[in-house]
Image: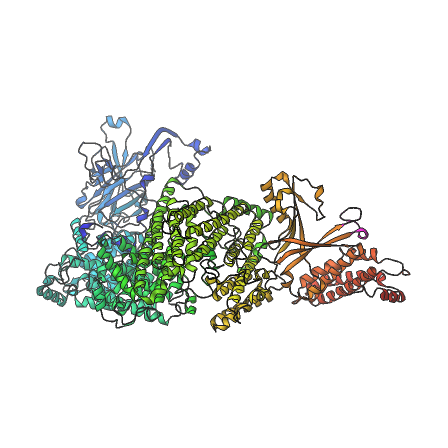
């Protein structure tokens, strides 16, 4: 913006770009920089003989030129070479002395006498639709062919002479000559065709046409003379003429078509006269045979030619010519007799209506002329003999019809708002009133429309830039009276007449004005601008600038337009709504602004009234938002909103608002309605009256937030963001005072954000889902041992704001929209006056102030600097190279197949975003576009990325420092008011949160200084209240003590030492800080993988140095206590070294963390912290069952301490209440009061050791159980929670709990038999290299559907990388290992698949599938063998060793592998093995038969496996081996048991067949018969083996009664 404009913007040439956006033709400008010089050489020429080769054959020949053919041989080749050099020529390189196609000289003129450069007129292959902007009147004549075969005499060497003859058959010197001759000739000759009576000509003649072609007295026509040219020397020697005329013909330039004259165009076939035509021959067409004349070939058409006019005078279209001619008749007041004065009006109306149906090419070429004539007919209807030809209405209808045709036909040349570039160019550069009167008495006299000159362009530009400087109070009584005189004038001005005709328009033209309303609006604005400029009315009062009739017409139009917008479909009226907004935008600079504001108010009122009645008001509200967006883009929006200075004295003196605030109606903690400050900081009625446009925009933003439409929210936020961005970059508002006033206009936006805080995007939760560089206070609420805030109850100001049900129905804003909204918030806070903010914040209630502080906290995380953008935008997927290789390998081996998808989709609907296998949070294992990297950045892109990263860093620092200033101001406000003391913690939370984010060194220095200041001023906040702030601060300070930046470490060390010192000064002990520092360090080493141990040890040494050199406390116990603390911290860091060594071994890492947690059994806070660390690690791996166990153990530990502190009936009785959840839970039991010291300072005093903390842990455990598909665990969890909630009568929470239980029970029923909880393997380690693991056995719990090769490959790969491939060997069998036979230098791993084992009595207590997969301690695996050492043999020699192992703890547990502590073995003989197999088959049949609902497929699979033809030999062979014996010999007990098993098996087969018969469809009848036949065959075969002598049977039964049992 130039400084000369004094706050205004140039409006003539850049208005379209600034408001509407550039049209598409701007982007179509040729790029000559990309064009390179080209040289074309043509070395081959052929003689073309038309009688032998037609043009069609010639084109075919050119296509086949490189192919040898007989056609090529027939053509005669002419030697020669044509070279064409084609090079771009820019405006800077334009040579001097150029000539246009009309031979008009162009600048720069050549004064050196060089050869001129001629421009060649282009005849494009495809028509270019561009209006004529310069004069051109040329005619190109192309003789084609002549046939003089039937002419008597010699006529072989033919040439043609072309002339343009006028009055008296005198030739006119208007034919362009050749380069070597004069510029213009009166006659021109064609080339001579030798010895050809039917020549074909290829000549071109260019003629400059006279202007007055339609003058009948002149009789302009083309005259052609045909000569025979003698080529013999005898004729020259004898003096005979060389050229002998052999024929004549002519062609009039003007042809009559339906009474209208038109310039000739196209192909013509003319007869040829032998003798020269008689006088006055031009009055008739050569097609008419004149009497007493001789014609060649009996007056046949033997001469053909083509005529192509290129004229800006003659349209070439009959409809356009008719309209032009009628306008010319009226202008000259000479009406032809064939029309008559009585019919001229109807004829003109018909001609106007026919314009829209004219050919598109001529219509667009003469668009400016036609529009000019139509506007003239609208503005000044013609008069004939004193009577007006009333065609204004028809002219307006024709005008809008032409606009519709042009816009529709040239839809590619429209901008984003549907404006055609040609029509727009006409309005801005060609439609101008040439002369306006200077006096009011001449207000409606002569004016006309004409193309503007350079001086007029300058005048309009001056007017556009002078609108806002026009003083509305500079008018005098004279000017006012003059204005009144102008209003009384009976004649109308252009803008008045256009508006009047628009009000009368109806039907189709009315629809066209709605579709292309921008044209009429821009036309009216243009005419108004010219009127004010030329009539010197710029300094009139705005109310007196235009007549009352014009204002009334505009009012009528606006009312009708608003009705159209409200009652029309939004999609169809969008463009018109935008055009109306731009019209109001321009009217703010021309009309009385009160009138325009009334229109805007009426528009908004109608839209709001209509939106209330609609089921889906979103489209209408979107239209209104677009409308306000355009109005708000006014260049003088700031003064339009009356931004008066707001002093504190003014605030105290302002009266109360007469109407309640829009936001205060729904706010619980807004400013008191009687407060005068409300009018300026909330959207009250007084605010909207004083700041009209911004008040409307902010009110609309507030209303849109109430509508559940995310896209509309984003659109509304972008409007505010663009406005503030525009203000910020405007140099007019660079002064501090102007910024204060500007920010004051937008103060209500802060209240709007506070009202809709729950809808903002959760950046903190998003960062925790992705994994943060800090443990985020131990996963936000996993343990809360350090900064624990309960999640079962709502956070202050955030989730308890307003109606929870209403808030939940509103969609949450996306990250980008929230970022823009918070950027606007920070701009207002930074730019606003400090006294204004202080006065406002002093009046806020506590809850509202807490909301404000939470917005600051959210903003800090939103604008956190995360490094260069290249890390996120250039092929970075968040997957490291090694992880990527592992993923691909696992995918090939099948380890991430359906097993991961089944469990995780069952748990949460999609795969976990924390799983490294899942990318993008889309439930996909991997994505092709994320695994394969993009191309590396170019140098330019790299520089751009670096610059963007620098800007991001500067923005982050600026926002954080602004937040610090604001928090300091809030702290001052809180300090001065006792009722707000509770909000000090919320203010301190903002600082803590800023410390947890990535910041620059300068910001960190300010943050640490602010933190130390708050701790010094309010020590009770950390040391006398609950420990959440102290714990969180210790965690942040310790994390920065390990920073790689020395300046940050020194600041963190100083803050941590001051914290210890202040705590000691209060009570001669800093046990609270000591405990929290220990807990924090334990949390850090357990959750941060890249913790720099060396830097942290340096920082601890620095703190120790501070304590030793502190002279004030040197004589106290403080230095000794610091040394003890530092020693304990070093011990924790030593555990860190061990943990780092096992980062790649998750099982060993969990064992180590469990061992550390177990070592802290006497310190519940630390044990809770390490359990939280384990929970986080397990959650990252997707092990939700184990994570749930960690949370249950934590809850049991908290419950145990709560029970000791205060015995409440509704609270659980310590760990005993959790036994149904885990048999391992008694680990958390307290065996004596000495073991626990809950009353000691700093011990068990965190929020986690409260009822709310217990509920938080249980709620998270329920989430983990649900994610693991263990819905029964959810039920057990809520059995503990419900009594607590019932005690406080929290019926809303009870409803949520029971609803969740209802869903869990439905899932249990729906997924009955479809859940898979895990796969178990026994893993034995043998070899000295394993260290403590040597000779140990473990049971590993693996994800569902894990195959033996998968875990075998994983462990072999891991230990091979650790010890070397040559030293690791996998044992393939499950036999007992004899260590003395193993190589002591190698490592051996034995892996065996195991299944849960239950005794028969135990199965009765585990009736469900869940219970048979929960609380597992005993597992079984079998090893087949024979007596001779083989693994497998025949049935009679096959033995099986069954091994039952017992683990130290029950699965699921807090870790995925548990040590084996006991084993027992039993050997099954061959017949016992057969009995076991038959019992299993019988049980499978029974389960399949009794399954509910019936599963036909499963039943048929089991039947086929039992009695199918391919497996009959299995049971039959067992019977044949073990039941085939002489009948006189008694059965053994085992044989008898096997016989009974076969009977039971046969009975179950029969039941299964009957059951299957009721389930099969008609197409399975044959299959059923085949199964029954197989069963009968099996039954008949087995029956003899099952019969037995009854006496022997009785004796056997008596003998073996103790061993008989049923299946």
Q: How is the image coloured?
A: rainbow
Classify residue 231 as left or right of residue 714: left
Residue extending furthest toward the front: 1115
Classify residue 178 as left or right of residue 807: left
**Residue displayed at 37% across by 37% down:** 50
- Where is residue 441, by image quadrant? bottom left
- Where is residue 1417, by image quadrant? bottom right
Q: What number of labels is visible?
A: 0
- Where is residue 537, by image quadrant? bottom left
Q: Between residues 1001 and 1069, which one lies in front from this camera angle?
A: 1069
Quadrant in which the C terminus appears: bottom right
Q: Between residues 1478 and 784, which one lies in front from this camera angle?
A: 784
Residue extending furthest toward the right: 1528
Relative to 244, say whether 1029 is above or below.
below
Q: x and y percent of residue 1398 in the render?
A: 69, 61
Q: x and y percent of residue 387 in the render?
A: 16, 65
Relative to 1419, say whether 1406 is above or below.
below
Query: Residue 1433 colored magenta?
Result: yes
Q: x and y percent of residue 221 in the render?
A: 23, 46
User: Do we see residue 509 in this rendering?
Assistant: no
For the record, the magenta segment spans: 1425-1438
Q: x and y percent of residue 149 in the render?
A: 34, 38
Residue extending furthest toward the left: 478
Query: Residue 319 colored magenta?
Result: no
Helix, strand or loop: magenta stretch: loop
User: Do we see residue 934 in this rendering?
Assistant: yes
């Amino acid at each position: 913006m130039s400084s000369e404009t004094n706050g205004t913007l140039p409006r003539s040439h850049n208005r379209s770009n600034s408001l509407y956006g550039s049209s598409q033709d701007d982007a179509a400008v040729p790029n000559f920089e990309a064009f390179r010089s080209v040289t074309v050489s043509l070395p081959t020429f052929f003689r073309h003989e038309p009688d032998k080769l037609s043009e069609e054959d010639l084109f075919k020949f050119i296509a086949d030129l490189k192919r040898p053919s007989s056609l090529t041989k027939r053509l005669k080749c002419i030697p020669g070479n044509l070279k064409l050099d084609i090079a771009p020529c820019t405006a800077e390189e334009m040579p001097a002395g150029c000539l246009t196609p009309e031979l008009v000289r162009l600048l720069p003129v050549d004064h050196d006498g060089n050869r001129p450069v001629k421009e060649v007129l282009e005849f494009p292959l495809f028509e270019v639709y561009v209006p004529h902007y310069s004069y051109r009147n040329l005619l190109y004549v192309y003789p084609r062919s002549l046939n003089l075969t039937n002419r008597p005499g010699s006529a072989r060497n033919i040439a043609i002479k072309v002339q343009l003859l006028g009055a008296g058959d005198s030739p006119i010197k208007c034919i362009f000559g050749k380069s070597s001759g004069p510029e213009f000739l009166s006659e021109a000759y064609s080339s001579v065709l030798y010895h050809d009576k039917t020549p074909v000509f290829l000549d071109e003649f260019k003629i400059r046409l006279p202007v007055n072609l339609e003058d009948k007295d002149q009789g302009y026509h083309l005259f052609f003379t045909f000569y025979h040219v003698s080529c013999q020397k005898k004729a020259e020697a004898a003096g005979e003429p060389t050229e002998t005329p052999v024929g004549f013909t002519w062609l009039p330039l003007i042809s009559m078509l339906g009474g209208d004259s038109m310039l000739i165009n196209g192909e013509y076939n003319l007869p040829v006269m032998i003798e020269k035509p008689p006088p006055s021959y031009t009055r008739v067409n050569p097609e008419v045979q004149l009497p007493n004349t001789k014609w060649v070939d009996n007056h046949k058409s033997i001469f053909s030619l083509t005529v192509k006019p290129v004229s800006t005078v003659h349209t070439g279209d009959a409809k356009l010519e008719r309209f032009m001619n009628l306008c010319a008749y009226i202008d000259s007041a000479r009406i032809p007799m064939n029309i008559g004065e009585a019919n001229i009006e109807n004829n003109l109306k018909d001609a106007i209506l026919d314009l829209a149906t004219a050919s598109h090419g001529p219509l667009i070429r003469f668009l400016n002329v036609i529009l000019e004539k139509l506007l003239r007919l609208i503005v000044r209807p013609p008069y004939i003999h004193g009577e007006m030809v009333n065609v204004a209405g028809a002219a307006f209808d024709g005008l809008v019809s032409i606009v519709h045709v042009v816009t529709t036909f040239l839809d590619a040349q429209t901008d984003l708002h549907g404006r055609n570039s040609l029509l727009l160019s006409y309005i801005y550069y060609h439609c101008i009133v040439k002369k306006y009167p200077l006096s009011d008495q001449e207000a409606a006299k002569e004016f006309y429309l004409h193309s503007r000159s350079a001086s007029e362009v300058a005048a309009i530009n001056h007017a556009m830039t002078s609108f806002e400087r026009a003083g509305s109070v500079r008018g005098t009584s004279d000017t006012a009276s003059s204005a009144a005189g102008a209003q009384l004038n009976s004649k109308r001005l252009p803008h008045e007449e256009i508006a009047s005709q628009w009000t009368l328009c109806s039907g189709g033209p009315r629809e066209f004005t709605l579709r292309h309303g921008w044209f009429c609006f821009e036309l009216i604005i243009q005419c108004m601008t010219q009127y004010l400029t030329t009539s010197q009315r710029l300094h009139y009062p705005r109310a007196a600038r235009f007549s009352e009739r014009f204002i009334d017409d505009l009012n009528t139009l606006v009312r009708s337009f608003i009705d159209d917008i409200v009652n029309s479909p939004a999609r169809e009226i969008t463009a018109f709504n935008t055009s109306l907004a731009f019209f109001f935008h321009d009217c703010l600079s021309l009309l009385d602004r009160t009138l325009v504001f009334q229109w805007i108010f009426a528009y908004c009122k109608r839209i709001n009234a209509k939106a209330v009645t609609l089921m889906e008001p979103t489209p209408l509200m979107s239209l209104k938002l677009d409308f306000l967006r355009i109005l708000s883009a006014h260049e003088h929006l700031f003064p339009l909103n009356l931004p008066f200075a707001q002093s504190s004295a003014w605030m105290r003196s302002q009266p109360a608002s007469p109407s309640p605030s829009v936001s205060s109606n729904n706010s619980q903690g807004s400013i008191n309605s009687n407060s005068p400050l409300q009018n300026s900081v909330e959207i009250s009625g007084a605010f909207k009256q004083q700041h009209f446009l911004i008040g409307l925009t902010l009110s609309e933003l507030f209303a849109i937030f109430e509508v559940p439409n995310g896209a509309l929210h984003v659109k509304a936020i972008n409007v505010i963001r663009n406005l503030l961005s525009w203000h910020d970059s405007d140099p007019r508002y660079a002064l501090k005072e102007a910024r204060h006033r500007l920010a004051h206009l937008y103060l209500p936006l802060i209240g709007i954000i506070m009202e809709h805080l729950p809808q903002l995007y959760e950046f903190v939760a998003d960062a925790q889902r992705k994994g943060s560089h800090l443990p985020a206070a131990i996963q936000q609420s996993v343990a809360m041992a350090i900064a624990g805030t309960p999640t079962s109850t709502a956070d202050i100001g955030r989730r308890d704001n307003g109606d929870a049900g209403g808030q939940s129905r509103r969609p949450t804003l996306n990250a980008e929209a929230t970022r823009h909204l918070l950027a606007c918030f920070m701009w207002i806070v930074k730019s606003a006056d400090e006294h204004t903010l202080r006065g406002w914040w002093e009046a806020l209630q506590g809850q509202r102030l807490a909301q404000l502080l939470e917005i600051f906290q959210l903003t800090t995380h939103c604008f956190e600097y995360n490094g260069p953008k290249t890390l996120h935008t250039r092929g970075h997927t968040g997957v490291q190279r090694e992880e990527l290789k592992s993923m691909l390998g696992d995918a090939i081996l099948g380890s991430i197949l359906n097993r991961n998808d089944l469990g995780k989709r069952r748990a949460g609907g999609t795969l976990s975003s924390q799983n490294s296998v899942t990318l993008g949070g889309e439930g996909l294992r991997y994505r092709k576009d994320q695994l394969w990297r993009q191309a590396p950045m170019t140098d330019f892109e790299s520089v751009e990325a670096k610059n963007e990263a620098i800007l991001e860093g500067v923005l982050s620092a600026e926002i954080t420092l602004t937040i610090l200033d604001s928090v300091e101001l809030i702290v001052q406000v809180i300090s001065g008011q006792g009722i707000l003391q509770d909000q000090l913690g919320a203010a301190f939370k903002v600082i803590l949160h800023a410390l947890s984010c990535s910041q620059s060194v300068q910001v960190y220095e300010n943050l640490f200084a602010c933190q130390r200041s708050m701790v010094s001023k309010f020590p009770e906040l950390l040391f006398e209240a609950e420990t959440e702030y102290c714990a969180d601060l210790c965690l942040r300070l310790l994390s920065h003590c390990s920073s790689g930046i020395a300046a940050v470490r020194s600041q963190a060390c100083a803050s941590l030492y001051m914290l210890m010192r202040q705590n000691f000064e209060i009570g001669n002990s800093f046990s609270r800080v000591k405990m929290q520092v220990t807990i924090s360090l334990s949390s850090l080493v357990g959750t941060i993988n890249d913790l720099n141990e060396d830097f942290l040890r340096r920082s601890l040494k620095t703190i120790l140095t501070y304590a030793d050199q502190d002279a004030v406390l040197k004589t106290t116990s403080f230095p000794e206590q610091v040394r003890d603390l530092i020693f304990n911290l070093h011990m924790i860091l030593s555990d860190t070294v061990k943990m780092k060594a096992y980062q790649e071994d998750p099982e060993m890492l969990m064992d180590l963390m469990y061992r550390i947690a177990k070592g802290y059994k006497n310190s519940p806070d630390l044990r809770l912290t390490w359990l939280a660390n384990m929970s986080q690690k397990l959650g990252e791996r997707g092990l939700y069952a184990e994570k749930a166990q960690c949370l249950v153990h934590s809850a049991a530990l908290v419950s145990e301490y709560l029970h000791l502190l205060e015995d409440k009936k509704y609270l659980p009785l310590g760990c005993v209440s959790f036994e149904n959840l885990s048999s391992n839970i008694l680990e958390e039991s307290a065996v004596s009061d000495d073991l626990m010291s809950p009353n000691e300072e700093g011990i068990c005093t965190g929020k986690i050791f409260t009822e709310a903390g217990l509920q938080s842990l249980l709620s998270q455990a329920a989430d983990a159980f649900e994610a693991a598909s263990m819905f029964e665990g959810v039920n057990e969890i809520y059995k503990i929670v419900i009594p607590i909630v019932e005690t406080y009568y929290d019926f809303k929470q009870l409803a949520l709990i029971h609803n969740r239980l209802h869903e869990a029970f439905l899932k249990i029923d729906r997924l009955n038999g479809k859940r898979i909880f895990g796969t178990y393997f026994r893993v034995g380690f043998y070899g000295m290299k394993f260290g403590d693991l040597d000779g140990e056995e473990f049971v590993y719990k693996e994800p569902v559907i894990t195959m033996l090769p998968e875990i075998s490959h994983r462990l072999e790969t891991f230990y091979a990388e650790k010890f070397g491939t040559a030293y690791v060997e996998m044992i393939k069998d499950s036999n007992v290992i004899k260590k003395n036979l193993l190589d002591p230098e190698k490592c051996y791993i034995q892996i065996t698949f195991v299944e849960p084992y239950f005794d028969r009595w135990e199965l009765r207590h585990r009736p469900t599938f869940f219970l048979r997969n929960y609380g597992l301690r005993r597992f079984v695996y079998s090893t087949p063998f024979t007596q001779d050492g083989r693994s497998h043999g025949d049935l009679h020699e096959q033995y099986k060793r069954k091994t039952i192992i017992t683990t130290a703890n029950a699965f699921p547990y807090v870790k995925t592998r548990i040590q084996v502590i006991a084993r027992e073995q039993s050997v099954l003989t061959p017949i016992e093995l057969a009995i076991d197999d038959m019992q299993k088959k019988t049980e499978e049949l029974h389960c399949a038969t009794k399954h509910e609902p019936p599963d036909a497929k499963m039943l048929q699979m089991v039947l086929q496996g039992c009695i199918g033809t391919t497996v009959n030999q299995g049971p039959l062979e067992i019977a044949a081996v073990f039941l085939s014996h002489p009948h006189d010999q008694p059965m053994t007990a085992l044989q008898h048991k096997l016989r009974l098993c076969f009977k039971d098996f046969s009975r179950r087969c029969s039941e299964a067949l009957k059951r299957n018969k009721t389930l099969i469809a008609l197409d399975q009848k044959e299959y059923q018969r085949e199964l029954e036949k197989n069963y009968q065959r099996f039954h008949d075969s087995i029956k003899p083996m099952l019969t037995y002598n009854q006496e022997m049977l009785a004796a056997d039964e008596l003998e073996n009664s103790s061993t008989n049992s049923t299946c």
